[in-house]
Image (spheres, helix red, strand yellow):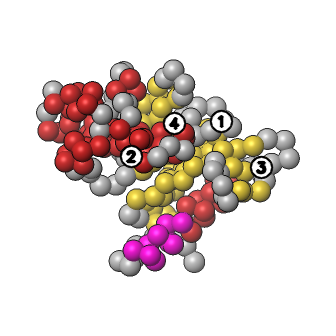
Amino acid sequence: MPKLHSVIFLQPAPQVIIASAQMAQQSSNRAQQKNAQSACVRLLLQIAMQRFDIVGEFYDHAYPYHIQSSDRRYFVSFSHSKNQVALIISLSPCAIDIETKDIKHNIAERYFHPNEIEMLSNLSCTDKQKLINFLWRLKECRIKLLQDQLYTGMGADMTPYVIGIQLNSISLNKTNAHYLYNHPDLKLTALF
């Protein structure tokens, strides 16, 4: 039976719910860990639906995941990393990503857009790592939101999203097409 602790609910904008929690247990077996993450993020969805009085049927057989109630559709996105799980529920298409470990510099250099590599080259080591982690989460969100291919999505230029973002503080920014929410303490980024 999955168990969660340290459940946090956030509402960065009207009609948007973000939930994050830690899994009570972690498995060293990769397959068991994936199954536990899946069960825990679905438990978190049940808790969020109860807390915010969302009644409807959850559809996870095709993307985008959604909850269909009698009068509206709520879009849902999940993410998990190690023993942390997160989700977003929104009336518009949405995506969330959570990463508990730092992304290595050589991975960024391999997959990131040249404009992003240029931006990173002008930063201190600490700021560089924060930006790499943020860009990775943002790219994961973009891939989920647009249902893009991994290679194409990782190579997309995300520098326009960085303008005005404060990597050290919680932020909500409006871009041309979406809202971008970043919570550095939770290592969580969302697009909606």
- Gap in Å between the C-alphas at discs 1 and 3? 13 Å
Q: Which residue is mark 3?
A: 68
Q: Return the x and y of residue 120 as percentages of the image width and height.
A: 21, 32
Q: CA distance from mark 1 to mark 4?
A: 10 Å
- At 34% from the left and 54% from the top, the residue drawn is 100
Amino acid type assigned to the residue bearing label 1 in the image: Ser
Q: Is residue 137 visible?
A: no
- Mark 4: few/some/many CA within 10 Å (<14, 14-19, 20+): many
- The crowding category of the residue bearing disc 1, from other C-alpha atoms within 10 Å (few below 14, some 14 to 19, many at least 20), is some
Label 4, secondary structure: give it: strand
Asked if the stretch drawn in magenta spans residue 110, the answer is no
Residue 191 is marked as 4
- Occupied quadrant, residue 83: bottom left
The amino acid marked with disc number 2 is: Tyr
Give the labeled residue for mark 1. 92
Q: Which residues are magenta?
A: 30-38
Q: Earlier in the sequence, mark 4 or mark 3?
A: 3
Mark 2 lies on residue: 151
Mark 2 residue element: helix
Please name the predominant secondary structure of the magenta segment in the image: helix
